[in-house]
Image (cartoon, rainbow, N blue to C red):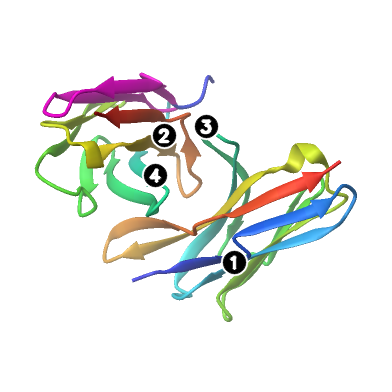
Amino acid sequence: DAGVIQSPRHEVTEMGQEVTLRCKPISGHDYLFWYRQTMMRGLELLIYFNNNVPIDDSGMPEDRFSAKMPNASFSTLKIQPSEPRDSAVYFCASSPNTEAFFGQGTRLTVV
Amino acid sequence: KQEVTQIPAALSVPEGENLVLNCSFTDSAIYNLQWFRQDPGKGLTSLLLIQSSQREQTSGRLNASLDKSSGRSTLYIAASQPGDSATYLCAAGGFSGSARQLTFGSGTQLTVLP
């Protein structure tokens, strides 16, 4: 298995633009997590899904953030409109039970 | 709310030394403790997973222990090598209500000098 695949690896966008981050989890994993990593706050859980259903989105910072998982092999995290303070590395992780496997991340820069 | 602390924040050692990284957590009601490695600009690589019923796990030169009652875990690295240089993160897996939580520490940045 290729592991958790995220795209794009890097994204630079202007403030106010819509940004969509994509994730393909490991096949067979029932859980999918979205994390954000910054120097100031470390790794923060944004939202997680179980069997494609959002379970806990309490970490989503604002209504500008939304996440979907239309099927077991694909998830998106959307920011609309983006702001400079959204600049961070966004990680997707999947899990079959209690062990988490992370993707390589998307480095987002909002200018 | 679970809080995870890692000490020290940074560590520099000469090649060949054995070393210990520390992780503490405030809520002992965890289902596992996971150690990760993160290289600069890269994702997180899972190193060891200790279930709540276990005391330790070993993989090669790495050994992780878990003491739930005291809220502590350690990662022991034997005979360190320059290739071990990275940031090491621990994460405590637990529940907040019915929702799963994986709470991360801020990491220990390890440098192994040749």
- Confirm whether circles 1 and 3 share one chain: yes
Q: Which mark is residue B41?
A: 3
Residue at mark 4: A37
> Disc 4 on helix, strand or loop?
strand
For the C terminus of chain B, give its image quadrant.
Answer: top right
Foreground: disc 1 or disc 4 = 4
Q: Position of residue B40 (x, y in %)?
A: 57, 35
- Confirm whether circles 4 and 2 share one chain: yes
Q: CA distance from mark 1 to mark 4?
A: 30 Å
Residue at mark 1: B53
Asked if residue A74 shows in the view, the reply is: no
- Image position of A108 with respect to B28: above or below: above
Query: Observer-nearest residue: B89 or A74?
Result: B89
Q: Position of residue A30 (x, y in %)?
A: 36, 37
Q: Residues within 10 Å of mark 4 (few under 14, many from 20)?
A: some
Q: Residue at x 33, y 71 (%)?
A: B1
Q: Is residue B98 magenta?
A: no
Q: Quadrant of residue A18?
A: top left
Q: CA distance from mark 2 to mark 3?
A: 25 Å
Q: CA distance from mark 1 to mark 3?
A: 34 Å
Hey, what amino acid is under mark 1? Ser
Residue at mark 2: A29
Query: Observer-nearest residue: B79 or B30?
Result: B79
Query: Observer-nearest residue: A18 or A16?
Result: A16
Hey, what amino acid is under mark 4? Gln
Q: Residues within 10 Å of mark 2 (few under 14, many from 20)?
A: some
Q: CA distance from mark 3 to mark 4?
A: 11 Å
Q: What segment carries the magenta color?
A: A5-26
Q: Earlier in the sequence, mark 4 or mark 2?
A: 2
Q: Position of B57 compared to B25: left or right?
A: right
**Tag 1 near tag 3, CB within 8 Å:** no
